[in-house]
Amino acid sequence: QKKSQTLFMLSGASQVCSKALTSLSLANGLSFPLAVLAKSGKMAPVMLGQLALGNTTYSIRDYIQVSCIIAGTCIVGLSKAKNATSMNSSSPLGVFFIVLSLFMDGLTGGIQKRIKENVNASSQEISAHEFMLNTNTYMMMVAFIVSILKGEILGGIQYCLNNSEMSVLILRFCICSAVGQSFIFYTIANFDPLVCSTVTTTRKVFSVLLSIWYKGHILNHQGWCGIILAVVGVSSEVQHKVHRSVKKEKKKFHKGSPTPKS
């Protein structure tokens, strides 16, 4: 239990650092399109983090699927960029911070995998909301300590008190975030951090499809190629996981069934 709490603390700290580093990259001259594209490749560092910290192994098919999803999402992002100059105007310091942010994403994925392994080894179960509560508690603690050290907390509170409409927006954001995180942590607790990264990455592609259908936006040929590539990657991953799940169920069934007497 103590070891799991230490891992939850590290997971919370790495997630806060990842978000902070993304904000720092934008504040230090990284173009927004490039930041979006970099975070679209989040699956790669998460996979590396699970290889290094989570004792996970992947097949060649897994690597190809992840590559298709990342490449497809990046192509869609590039097709939506208004001009090439905004992509090339990023500062080296901004790029440095976004690379560190991706490193933290990979660290988080590996730690979350290790938490699940520790829980399974102790023959205990952890629900999605327990996972969410522990992670967010440590995230809040780390953010609170940093804000005190930087002297920003009093200013933030004063700003919210002086702008009541902002407090309402923050409350709405917190409610939406809590509902969304319930699904995210359900995926992490019951499946895998990489599966969660797959979902959060490909939602960008499906958001584009929704905007085309609902708002009548137009996508160029490059964008459609990216969507097809990402959908192929996702479809292959879903089919692979369903096939593996059916195989496991068959094995359990054969183990549980009585052997015929001769």
Image (cartoon, helix red, strand yellow):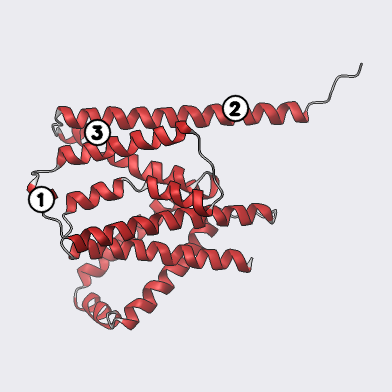
Q: Residue furthest right?
A: 262
Foreground tag (1 vs 3): 1
Name the front one of labels 3 and 2. Answer: 2
Foreground mark, 1 or 2, reads 1
Query: Residue 131, relative to residue 198: is it above or below?
Result: below
Q: What mark, if any, has residue 246 been given in the picture?
A: 2
Q: Which mark is residue 209?
A: 3
Mark 2 lies on a secondary structure that is helix
In front of the other: 236 or 177: 236
Query: Label 1 belongs to which residue?
Result: 86
Whole-angstrom CA distance, mark 1 to mark 2, is 47 Å
Left or right of 160? Residue 231 is: right
Instruction: Look at label 2 and name its amino acid.
Output: Val
Say whether residue 216 is left or right of residue 108.
Answer: left
Mark sitting earlier along the chain (3/2): 3
Q: Earlier in the sequence, mark 1 or mark 2?
A: 1
